[in-house]
Image (cartoon, rainbow, N blue to C red):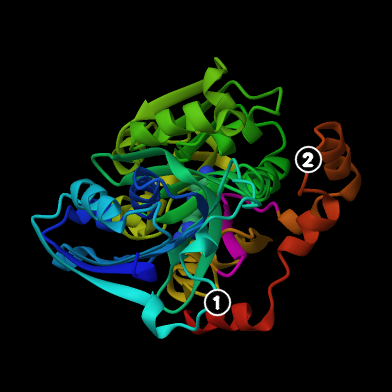
Amino acid sequence: MKSVGRHVLVEYYGCDAELLGDASLLERAVVKAAKDAGATVLNSTFHQFAPVGTSGVVVIQESHLAIHTWPEFKYAAVDLFTCGDMIDPWVSFNSLKESLKSEFSSPMEMLRGQFELLPEVGGEEMWEHEDAPEIPPKYTRNVWFTEYEEDHGLSLRHKGDKLFDRQSEFQRVTVLDTYKFGKMLTLDGAIMTTENDEYVYHEMIIHPAVQLVGSPKRILIVGGGDGGAARECLRYPTLEEVVVAEIDDVVVEASKEFLPTIASSFADPKTTLKIGDGIKYVAEADSESFDIVIVDSTDPVGPAEGLFSYDFYRHCHRLLRAGGVMVVQSESPRYNEEAFAGVHKCNQEIFGADRVFPYLAYVPTYPTGMWSFSMAVKGDAKPRDLAADALDAFAESHDLKYYNSDVHHAAFALPTFARKLLKSAQ
Ligand code: AG3
């Protein structure tokens, strides 16, 4: 041996672009490259970037392996740095070449810490430690998911592997297991729901409206393929049917398999699942056939775009019986001002200016944490007139985690900036 370490710098060209853009798979490939060479893996940290690209480092007891990818160029820049004569970085080089499906590559080796240039102490005998540290049975994986908005984002560390990841006809459906929020469903990289905070959104998209209506028999949910909104509807004994009109059956499949506490509603005979376009469903459904219509959609891009339109809300209004209520998830007033104000304005035109009630809830995993809903009433009832006792009795008997009478009344209080957004849209 001529040096304490060997450092192979590699240019991998013509790689599998999908793999280069997937932090979970890439982490697996680099860890495999380390293990193939006989290295002891201590820790891995991988970050997936937007719009594309991944950076990751695997720290091994014998130095490190690092990778930076440009999927758009099918290119990866890699460092394979190993110390000691037990590990051969060229084994890792070959392993990674195979995993990345690189068509051609240009490696070069550099000796790190050449013995002839180092002081006398140490040398090869340094590697013959009898009291070598115990090999840890498990390494620590730091694999991060980030939801990016234009100029900000939310990063969550997850267990590393994707539990579900499929391109459906409409979108990419993914389930990850996060440390902070449990299992999480994302659609095209946007967080839809997590096991640990879903109750905020699902209680709040349903109970304010149902409490106002009183004894609902039929509820329509447009979207809501995870089943969480339907689950909250099923708490009401007067309910005869909740129809979930979801466009993407892959969302339902992933939720049933990995988010069973949220998707439990699909097992209830009162739940009718209609897989198909929600816009078509509302256009064809009978007038005045529902007590409540809930629009539990994704963001107004891609498959959900048409759910943020005048024509669509017009039909929702038509489906409601007199006294019925519609609730639409209307995005965050802190980052999608247009959707927040636009939904409100649209509903005012359809239901009447004093029959639309925007309200807020705090969902830690949605962009900015502040989320809005627009409640529109086909009648004169006002959500702020509801008596506290009945709301609390309901919330307590169901052991709800977010909704109670104080929250119900406070949710309709808008900060001044949000009020102004609504005013300026008039
Ligand atoms: N529907 C609204 C989620 C929107 C979140 N947006 C985002 N993460 N960019 C959630 C569906 C839950 N049933």
Q: Secondary structure at mark 1?
A: loop
> Disc 2 marks which residue?
400
Query: In this orientation, does residue 381 appear?
Result: yes
Residue 373 lies in the magenta-colored region: yes
- Residue range corresponding to the magenta coloring: 368-381
Vertical comparison of 39 with 336: above or below: above
Total numbered labels: 2
Viewer-nearest of labels 1 and 2? 1
Which residue is rendered at x = 36% and y = 45% of the image? 32
Which residue is rendered at x = 43% and y = 25% of the image? 273
Question: Within the image, what quadrant is residue 371 found in?
Answer: bottom right
The one nearer the camera, 390 or 164, is 164
> Disc 1 marks which residue?
121
Amino acid tagged 1: Val
Residue 83: image location, x then y, percent: 42, 63
Amino acid tagged 2: Leu
Which residue is rendered at x = 55% and y = 72% of the image? 333
Residue 299: image location, x then y, percent: 41, 58
Quadrant where the image shows the N terminus: bottom left
Vertical comparison of 256 with 159: above or below: above
Q: Is residue 267 left or right of residue 364?
A: left
Vertical comparison of 134 with 410: above or below: above
Q: Within 10 angstroms of label 1, few (less than 14), some, or many (20 or more) residues?
A: few
Which residue is rendered at x = 59% and y = 34% of the image? 262
Residue 53: image location, x then y, percent: 30, 66
Could you tell which of marks 1 and 2 lies nearer the N-terminus? 1
Q: What numbered label is drawn on residue 286?
A: none
